[in-house]
Image (spheres, grey):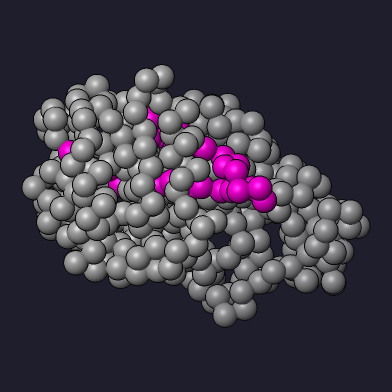
Amino acid sequence: MQTVMDLDFTSKTVLVRVDYNLPMDEDGKIADDNRIQATLPLINFLVEKGAKIVIASHMGRPKGKRVAALSLEPAAKRLAELLPPGTSVDFIDDCIGPEVKARVAGLEPGQVLVLENLRFYPGEGENDPEFARSLADLCQVYVNDAFAVSHRSAASIVAITEFVDEACAGFLLEKEVKCFTDSVENPVRPLVAVIGGAKVSSKLAALENMLNHVNTLLIGGAMANTFLKSQGSEVGASMVEEELIETAARIVETAEKRGVQLILPVDLVVADEFKADAGIRTVEAAEVPQGWMALDIGPETARLFEAAVKAAGTIVWNGPMGVFEMEPFRAGTQKMADAIADSKAFSVVGGGDTGLAVNMCGVADKISYVSTGGGAFLHLMEGKKLPGVVALDKK
């Protein structure tokens, strides 16, 4: 796919698809502006090149209707604050139509216009060609810098590429794809994958695909319970996906056949209730008491995982080791985060909960790359191509 370094943007109108799907607090203020920050290098680059810049994004799930709480106006205001003083940033409360076309036509080189939430129109989620054509009519060049939604076939991600003269990847999309390729398809070995989170079902395809790539696979989080039960362990009242016990056993067998070292927890931090002030103890992984539930990996498991990470040349981490949001069950995730941060290996962390975890653990600046997109990152881990990247490749 082409990147922004391949094109001339001088005096051209450029529609940039970003991901400004931001977390908002109860007062309607932005709680975390990291997704805006991640797009600043591209926007500053385009300003310097004399482009007329149109920013497009979605926000939340308005289901094709206008929802005032999901307006992108707060994002536009924050973008204006973050760009260099003197940069012109305006907002318009629609994303297609005559008024929008007129405002875009009036842009001068170096000016920025932020469009209203694309998902206020059902055509966005439906990958509708007519909606895509309306967006394409606003620009001469289309730039996709929205890795976090490039696993979705949306009009502003896929269909739009059929109607624009030129299309390319932005810095963020290019970097995300390159980091994943470097870490999984062309890694410095040993390649160690750390997989956690709640459900085997949500990461089954990723687990099966990663067996084709990794040297070592570490499994923690609630999903480890299903694997432990498949190996005959008593897991008490821990969360288990009963319908996937045989699948988990098959994954363990496949790993052994392929020479992949698969490490499951040997001890667990368990609680008698799912709350921070519950009764807590550490037990062997095979002996969770009746009525108790595993909510974190234990200290011995953490040591095993740390040793595997220390020997790695490349580390891919997706999913926390326990209920890290509750302080009593954060130790496993914290130790994993610290071990990866201290490693000399190239480390890539999937977005979503794992990105939140490394920030909470205070090590985000010591990770080689923290992805901006949990779903898109997992999509790649499953061995699938991103529709947004495929569309750019075809263009």
Left or right: residue 365 compared with residue 57: right
- Residue at 54 percent of width and 27 percent of height: 365
Q: Can residue 375 be seen in this view?
A: yes
- Residue at 49 percent of width and 35 percent of height: 78
- Residue at 54 percent of width and 56 percent of height: 69
Q: Position of residue 246 (x, y in %)?
A: 54, 76
Between 198 and 59, the residue placed more toward the observer is 59
Left or right: residue 79 compared with residue 395: right
The magenta segment is 13-40
Whether residue 53 appears in magenta in the rendering, the answer is: no
- Residue at 85 percent of width and 72 percent of height: 290
Q: Position of residue 59 (x, y in %)?
A: 45, 54
Residue 203, compared with residue 52, is above or below; it is below
Between 383 and 234, the residue placed more toward the observer is 383
Q: Position of residue 231 (x, y in %)?
A: 63, 68
User: Which image quadrant for residue 237?
Assistant: bottom right
Residue 286, compared with residue 196, is above or below; it is below
Q: Residue furthest bottom?
A: 243
Between 8 and 313, the residue placed more toward the observer is 8
Between 286 and 207, the residue placed more toward the observer is 207
